[in-house]
Amino acid sequence: MNTFDTTKTYTVTDLIRDTSITIVIIAVIYSVVLLWFPEKLTIFSLIVPGLLLLKDFYDKASRRRLQRLTFDTDRKEVVLFFKSLFSDIKQIRLPFDKARLEVLVEKSKLQIFEPLTLFIMKEKMEVFELNKSKDNLQVDTLQEIVRTAEHLAIPIIHK
């Protein structure tokens, strides 16, 4: 049995930190509009940034984040424990013969994109996405998950 745990859970503080970039961008755009075009600023111009901020908040708070990933060799299944900020811990169980792993490696000199993203699939349907920023897993840990899946003969698709 191989188990991979995340070291930190996602909290409201993390959500505020992640959303602060959006808040700063909206504040800068709003300041520019206010300085150069004060007559264009109406109550309706508050609605769009507010909706964008709420959407960003909701998207980040509702993302399913990994708590634990276990390759159970006794039962021959992959067990995922995950939660979002809005939910308790839930689990997904996938038998080895139905599980697939898609590996997406970004080859970019910019560090904007995720260097390695894993998609855990049930046959051809995506069940869970793992990456460094969302799940707080190091790239080495993600690579170890791929090696473990290879060792257990779980099909791996490189993209």
Image (cartoon, rainbow, N blue to C red):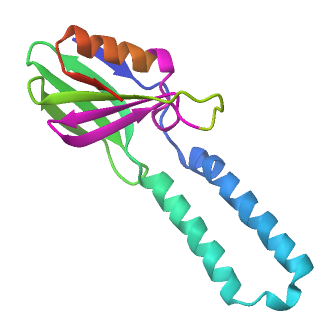
Residue lying at 34% horizontally and 17% vertically, measured from the top left: 145
Residue 93, image x and y in percent?
16, 33
Q: Is residue 77 left or right of residue 20?
A: left
Residue stretch in magenta = 113-140
Residue 18, image x and y in percent?
61, 48
Foreground: 6 or 21? 21
Residue 153, image x and y in percent?
16, 13
Q: Is residue 91 left or right of residue 30?
A: left
Q: Is residue 107 left or right of residue 84?
A: right
Residue 92, image x and y in percent?
20, 37
How many numbered discs sit on the rendered protein?
0
Residue lying at 78% horizontally and 68% vertically, measured from the top left: 29
Quarter of the picture containing the C terminus is top left
Foreground: 30 or 102? 102
139, above or below 118, in the image: above
Residue lying at 54% horizontally and 60% vertically, measured from the top left: 56
41, above or below 125, in the image: below
99, above or below 146, in the image: below
